[in-house]
């Protein structure tokens, strides 16, 4: 029995489908269980409620661990690990460059959980994905309104990865022991900037999509206006600036090594989700 946390999220939904297609017993944990597809065992779980977590992990053999980006990740990771019981395997979604200079925000989110998992006596695999192809869905309002797509990365590129490939790698890590004690950095096979992705989308949609650069000071002011504190805003800007400077402009062969095939391209992801862009 595999427990999938974040079961209604971008990766979780695909992971549930892939596991059920392989007839693997799976339990979905969600604060909104009504959103889980019929036929899947579901438990209402909340990282802030230890009793609900104990019910979620009761009788499971492996846990897929993911939570929404933010400063709560360390607390949530450790809360689940504290009650993990007999679960002999853990697969955690982390982030690229965790622990590296320039990525202090995501490192602060993920390093405590990564370290606790590595210090445990369980089998474990840590997945550090690059920028998700699905992040481009944030541009839908601008695309529909005919406005320029904002970029916080300038011309900086990243090895944009299809979330479906992340889920597929997670399946292999959960179902076999071949990936025990491995940290995989998951990327696509090409480096793309926001402008590159916009060009692919524009061609697909038959539109001319423009991109506008958002300077760091303007970016920071916007974060503060939305209620983010100074330190958090500084860390976020630092991460964007790292990508802008090229720190994320790399690809790995980890997806290919695990899946035995090349990663899906951004064009493939966009084509398969064209209807979401209107």
Image (cartoon, grey):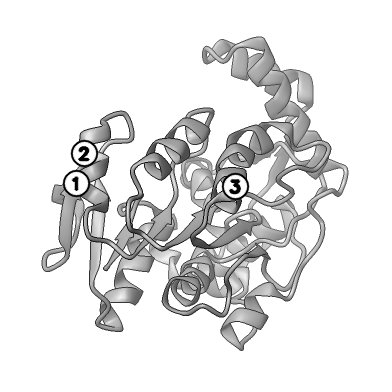
Direction from residue 204 to residue 184 in the image, left or right: right
Q: Residue at x 61, y 64 (%)?
A: 161
Q: Is residue 38 left or right of residue 207?
A: left
How crowded is the residue under tag 3: few (<14 C-alpha within 10 Å), some, or many (20+)? many
Q: Are marks 3 and 1 in contact (CB under 8 Å)?
A: no
The picture places residue 74, in percent across and down from the top left corner, at 52, 34
In the rendered image, which quarter is residue 132 located in?
Answer: bottom right
Mark 2 near mark 1, Cβ–Cβ under 8 Å?
yes
- According to the picture, the residue beneath numbered tag 3 turns out to be 114
* Quadrant in the rendering for residue 262: bottom right
Name which residue lies at 48% across and 68% down.
Answer: 170
Where disc 2 sits, the SS reads: helix
Classify mark 1: residues with Cα within 10 Å, few (<14), some (14-19) or many (20+): some
Q: CA distance from mark 2 to mark 1?
A: 5 Å
Label 2, label 3: how many angstroms apart (C-alpha)? 23 Å
Residue located beneath label 2 in the image: 52
Quarter of the figure with the N terminus: bottom left
Residue wearing tag 1: 55
Residue 236 image label: none
Residue nearer the viewer, 122 or 127: 122
Reply above or below: 195 against 269. above
Q: Image quadrant of residue 82?
A: top left
Establish if 224 lies above or below 254: above
| 198 relative position to 137: left or right | right
- Residue 224 versus residue 175 in the image, above or below: above
For marks 3 and 1, give the CA distance. 23 Å
User: Secondary structure beneath disc 1?
Assistant: helix
x and y percentages locating residue 99 in the rendered image: 75, 42
Q: Is residue 178 visible?
A: yes
- SS label for mark 3: helix
Identify which residue is drawn at 66% across, 19% down.
233
């Amino acid at each position: 029995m595999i427990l999938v946390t974040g079961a209604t999220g971008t990766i979780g939904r695909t992971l549930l489908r892939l596991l059920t297609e392989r007839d693997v017993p799976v339990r979905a944990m969600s604060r909104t269980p009504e959103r889980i597809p019929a036929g899947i065992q579901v438990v209402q779980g909340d990282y802030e409620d230890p009793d609900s977590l104990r019910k979620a992990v009761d009788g499971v053999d492996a846990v897929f661990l993911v939570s929404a980006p933010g400063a709560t990740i360390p607390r949530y990771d450790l809360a689940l690990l504290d009650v993990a019981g007999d679960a002999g395997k853990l697969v955690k979604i982390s982030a690229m460059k965790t622990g590296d200079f320039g990525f202090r925000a995501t490192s602060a989110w993920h390093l405590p959980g990564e370290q606790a998992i590595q210090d445990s006596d369980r089998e474990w695999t840590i997945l550090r994905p690059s920028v998700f192809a699905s992040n481009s869905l944030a541009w839908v309002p601008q695309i529909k309104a005919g406005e320029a797509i904002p970029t916080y990365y300038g011309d900086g590129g990243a090895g944009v990865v299809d979330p479906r490939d992340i889920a597929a790698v997670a399946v292999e890590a959960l179902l076999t022991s071949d990936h025990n004690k491995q940290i995989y950095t998951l990327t696509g096979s090409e480096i793309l900037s926001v402008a590159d992705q916009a060009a692919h989308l524009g061609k697909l949609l038959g539109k001319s999509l423009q991109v506008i650069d958002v300077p760091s000071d303007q970016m920071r002011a916007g974060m503060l206006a939305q209620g983010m504190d100074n330190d958090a805003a500084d860390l976020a800007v630092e991460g964007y600036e790292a990508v802008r400077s090229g720190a994320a402009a790399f690809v790995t062969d980890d997806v290919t090594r695990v899946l035995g095939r090349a990663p899906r391209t951004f064009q493939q992801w966009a084509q398969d989700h064209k209807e979401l862009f209107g």
